[in-house]
Image (spheres, rainbow, N blue to C red):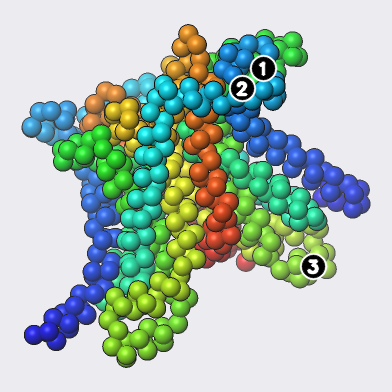
Amino acid sequence: MKADMPGAAGPALFSHLILAAVALFSVFPLFWMVTTAFTPNDLILSKAFRFWPDDPTLSNFTDAFRRYPVGAWLWNSIVVAGLVTLGKMLIAVPAGFAFAHMRFKFRNVLFWTVVATLTFPTAIGIVPLYVGISLIGWYDTLTAVIVPSIAYIGFYVFFMRQAFRQLPGAMFEAARMDGAGPFRQLLHFGVPNVLSPIASLSVISFMGAWNIYLWSLLVLDSQDKQTLAVGIKYFSSIDDVEPLWGPAMAVALLSALPTIVVFVSAQRYVMAAFTGQADR
Amino acid sequence: MQIALRATLKVLAPYILVGPAILFVLVFLYAPVVFSGVLSVSDWNFISPDMKFVGLDNYRVILRDPQFQTALLNTVLYCAVLIPAQIAVPLALATLILRIRKPFLANAYKAALFLPTMLAYSTAGMAWLWLFDPTNGFFNTLLGWFGLAPSRWYSDPSLALWCVVIVSFWKNFGLNMLLFAAALASVPGSVMEAAKLDGAGSWRAFWTVELPLISPTFFFVAVTTTMSVLDDIAATIDVLTEGGPFGQSTNVLYYMFERGLRFFQFGQASASAVLIILLVLIVTWAQVRMFERRVHYES
């Protein structure tokens, strides 16, 4: 109320001040991460540390790769995020199609069985799952990270059903008249018309899988089997004689870039997905 | 023969299409939850083949464990601080951003505020761990410029929990801000004008007209925020403090994780898993109730 009083310039200035302060809070830790990543490590630990290094260096990156298999971590992260996303799409797209355009017994029960898992905290079954994974010999493999992570498809199935529902049922009816079976209907008439929802879900899934932390920590053991999300912790040994903040921030930057690139390049789809979901 | 096969395939088709989804959620989500319940009333150490039924012993042990009590108290604290903060602050920021007339500036603010959301939890944790670093970290350098004594931040028992709160808030508020901004932008301007013509001040118009109109978004944000506060925060805790010092920043999920992974007390870990499920149900139920009442009241 009060903010409206001083006329047009007052509230605008007020908004800018607050937003600028929050933006600083938001961006500064990342700016600091980038600065540190390009400053020589011995300079970081001295009083001569500046807001931007006089002569930026890549030595932190080479140092990080020399100490730990960072290249392998990066590759593992890409494999995990890629395969989890692929798996989720291969499962959620057909299921969404069937729930949207086919009539069959137990349809509602099955649909809610899948969608109710939306409310499951990710770590809830972690103990039995850990035991099971160990018993079938998946411990310390990427398979152990990938396969159970695919199961969080509640949101994806719900979302794909909504996407397929937007398509006219008459289109599939006509295809059926022409002798197209359900699988042909899905591949030739369904999928080509929901490419943008699929793209947005893929981005959300990729970012989520890039993030998997506790579960990877639990089932991965060997140094070269880690993903970036868990591997980065190797650099945080606080009581080290010579702290490795330079290499640590180099790896942090390496881990941050792929998701930022993926998100920015698909920004429009993702925002549509998020806001579309929120409107329903 | 071929026709019969085709007919069967047609009947089976929907089940083939939804089958993998059902299979995955049953095997990797429902079954583990059920087994958690079984393990929580058993004494089993993974190695021995026999599993002994011990009733509620595991529950008794963890409920008496001071570590668990701290974890439970901290969980309540995390929820009580972070859930309102991650809803109210982004909502306020969204209304501020919508007042910015220049699209370029509005987008720049949105991008800046959303940037942290794109990081992994552990990456975010590492960036802040470095800022908090007691010897060379930026915050202590900053304190030094003002002639203040350095702080131990995450290794100070009374500050550790608040370090986790700040990092968690920083990582998550941008997404909610974007969701609120998108929802508020979709409220037709004519509705707000009508409210003002009826004599409602902008504050009252916001509460009685705009907020109920975006209530689906509000509910979605409330539920997802609750899940993330109960769930994802464990990753931040692990990177920043590992629950310490002296368990001062742990939460129930991290407690469960430690019981299971570090001490291989599967019964106790499962008992805490069951308690977490109950907690989630209670909080979600409370939110649904609050949400219903609000909507009834306004309409």
Q: How many marks?
A: 3
Residue A7 drawn above or below residue B163: below
Residue A38, horizontal then vertical, whole percent? 60, 26
* Chain of the residue on which disc 1 is drawn: A
Q: Residue at x 62, y 66 (%)?
A: B299
Q: Which residue is mark 1?
A: A49
User: Label 3 to label 2, Cα distance in Å?
Assistant: 54 Å
Rendering quarter of residue A187: bottom left
User: Label 2 to label 1, Cα distance in Å?
Assistant: 8 Å
Find out whether the residues at labels 2 and 1 contact each other: C-beta distance under 8 Å: yes
In front: A134, or B51?
A: A134
Q: Residue at x 63, y 49 (%)?
A: B177
Residue B231, horizontal then vertical, whole percent? 43, 40
Q: Name the amino acid, label 1.
A: Phe
Give SS at disc 2.
loop
- Left or right placement of residue A99 versus residue A229 in this view: left
Q: Which residue is mark 2?
A: A39
Looking at the picture, do discs 1 and 3 lie on one chain? no
In front: B260, or B8?
A: B8
- Crowding at label 2, few (<14), some or many (≥20) Cα neighbours within 10 Å? many
- Left or right placement of residue B107 versus residue B233 in this view: right
Looking at the picture, do discs 2 and 1 lie on one chain? yes
Q: Which residue is mark 3?
A: B193
- Crowding at label 3, few (<14), some or many (≥20) Cα neighbours within 10 Å? some
Between disc 3 and disc 2, the foreground one is 2
Give SS at disc 1.
loop
Residue A203, horizontal then vertical, whole percent? 48, 54
Q: Residue at x 20, y 75 (%)?
A: B12
Q: Name the amino acid, label 3.
A: Glu
In front: B261, or A71?
A: A71
Circle nearer the N terminus (2, 1): 2
Residue B199, horizontal then vertical, whole percent? 83, 64
